[in-house]
Amino acid sequence: GAVVSQHPSWVICKSGTSVKIECRSLDFQATTMFWYRQFPKQSLMLMATSNEGSKATYEQGVEKDKFLINHASLTLSTLTVTSAHPEDSSFYICSALGSSYEQYFGPGTRLTVT
Amino acid sequence: RKEVEQDPGPFNVPEGATVAFNCTYSNSASQSFFWYRQDCRKEPKLLMSVYSSGNEDGRFTAQLNRASQYISLLIRDSKLSDSATYLCVVNYNFNKFYFGSGTKLNVKP
């Protein structure tokens, strides 16, 4: 299957700082990527849909000014968590949409805010 | 009512057993269907897409029943390494996806 990478795989930051997470589709071009977060023992929660060359579409309850998404190319989408707080600590996973509407997920980024 | 419903399990089965999961969806206009597996603290990995004609990949068989609005996954000859959470995912309207909450499978020696 297609390969999606995420960087970093884990990050610890101090409260109030910003963290950028990169999601790359390595062997295919993805017009659409998705950003999820997942808390322990819970389901994936969609945060936003990232479309190349246009503004991201955020799910209800997700603050677009706090979670900045940039999908500047067909292989890269970034999520920036601004002014992070401990409650933002979570597992953030991106996915890229394939040609048959299958999603290929990145390995995730574990964010801990102290 | 949830868009996609799955029995959360856990399903505890011995090695070699056959186990089946079902997943129901509410939107009759849903277009594409998938099964993913997710290991603890890892990302979901695509197991297989599900087609109306049914499809098989080794020990795994997936089927779609549009009339009754459910998809199924059958695992034959279960292995210890099959222990994971299995997610069904339904695609509606191109970019809209609904995830089941996952069914946990524990395969015991």
Image (cartoon, coloured by chain):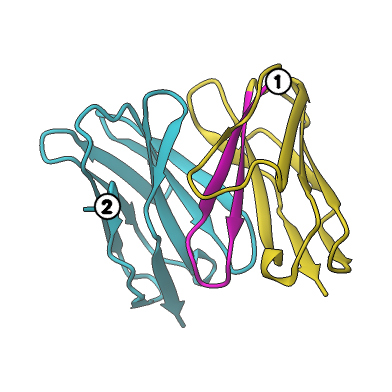
Q: Residue at x 70, y 20 (%)?
A: A29
Residue B29 has which mark? none
Q: Is residue A113 above or below residue B62?
A: below
In the figure, what tint was chain B given? cyan
Q: Is residue B53 above or below residue B45?
A: above
The type of residue carrying mark 1 is Gln
Residue that carries the numbered disc 1 in the rendered image: A29
Stretch of the chain drawn in magenta: A32-52
> Which chain is mark 1 on?
A
> On the rendered structure, is B14 left or right of A31?
left
Q: Residue at x 71, y 48 (%)?
A: A66
Residue that carries the numbered disc 2 in the rendered image: B2
The type of residue carrying mark 2 is Lys
Q: Quadrant of residue B5?
A: bottom left
Residue A8's spot in the image, x, y percent?
A: 85, 53
> Which chain is mark 2 on?
B
> On the rendered structure, is B64 left or right of B86?
left
Helix, strand or loop at disc 2?
A: loop
> On the rendered structure, is B65 left or right of B45?
left
